[in-house]
C-alpha cells in the first residue's frame, strides 16, 4: 500500500529471518528484503524461535541494521 500511495518514493525495508525476496520488487515497488529478524538490544541472550522457512536467517539489533544499511543518520518516517 505504501509503495502505491507514494509511487516508489517511499523506501520500504522488510526484515524477516526467512528470505521473502521477490523478483523486481526493488525496481517496481522500492521494497528491499533483508533475511534477518530484529532482536532487542537489552536481551541478546533470548533465543527466538522461528518457523522452518526462517531458520538460519539470524537476528540483528535495530542499530546494527541501520549501520549495515547505511541509514544511521537518515530520518525514518514510519517504523512498523
Image (cartoon, grey):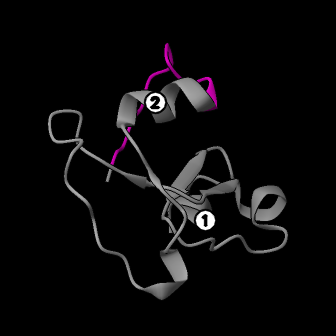
The residue wearing badge 2 is: 64
In the picture, which quadrant includes the C terminus? bottom left
Question: In the rendered view, does 21 fall on the left or right side of 36?
Answer: right
Q: In the image, residue 21 lies at what x, y percent?
A: 70, 70
Task: Specify which label sits upstream in the sequence, 1 or 2.
Answer: 1
Q: Residue at x 49, y 35 (%)?
A: 65
- Decide: few, some or many residues near mark 1? Use Cα within 10 Å; few <14, some 14-19, many ≥20: few
Q: Residue at x 63, y 71 (%)?
A: 19
Magenta span = 69-79
Marks 1 and 2, Cα distance to the nearest angstrom? 29 Å
Residue 58 in the magenta stretch? The answer is no
**Element marked by disc 1:** helix
The residue wearing badge 1 is: 4
Task: Determine which of the numbered discs, if any, sits on residue 58 in the image.
Answer: none
Residue 75 in the magenta stretch? The answer is yes
Q: Quadrant of residue 4?
A: bottom right
**Element marked by disc 2:** helix
Amino acid at each position: 500500500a505504501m509503495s502505491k500511495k507514494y509511487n516508489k518514493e517511499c523506501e520500504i525495508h522488510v526484515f524477516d529471518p526467512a528470505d521473502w525476496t521477490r523478483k523486481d520488487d526493488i525496481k517496481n515497488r522500492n521494497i528491499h528484503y533483508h533475511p534477518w529478524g530484529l532482536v532487542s538490544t537489552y536481551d541478546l541472550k533470548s533465543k527466538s524461535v522461528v518457523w522452518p522457512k526462517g531458520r538460519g536467517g539470524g537476528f540483528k539489533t535495530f542499530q546494527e541494521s541501520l549501520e549495515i544499511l547505511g541509514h544511521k543518520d537518515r530520518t525514518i518516517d514510519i517504523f512498523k
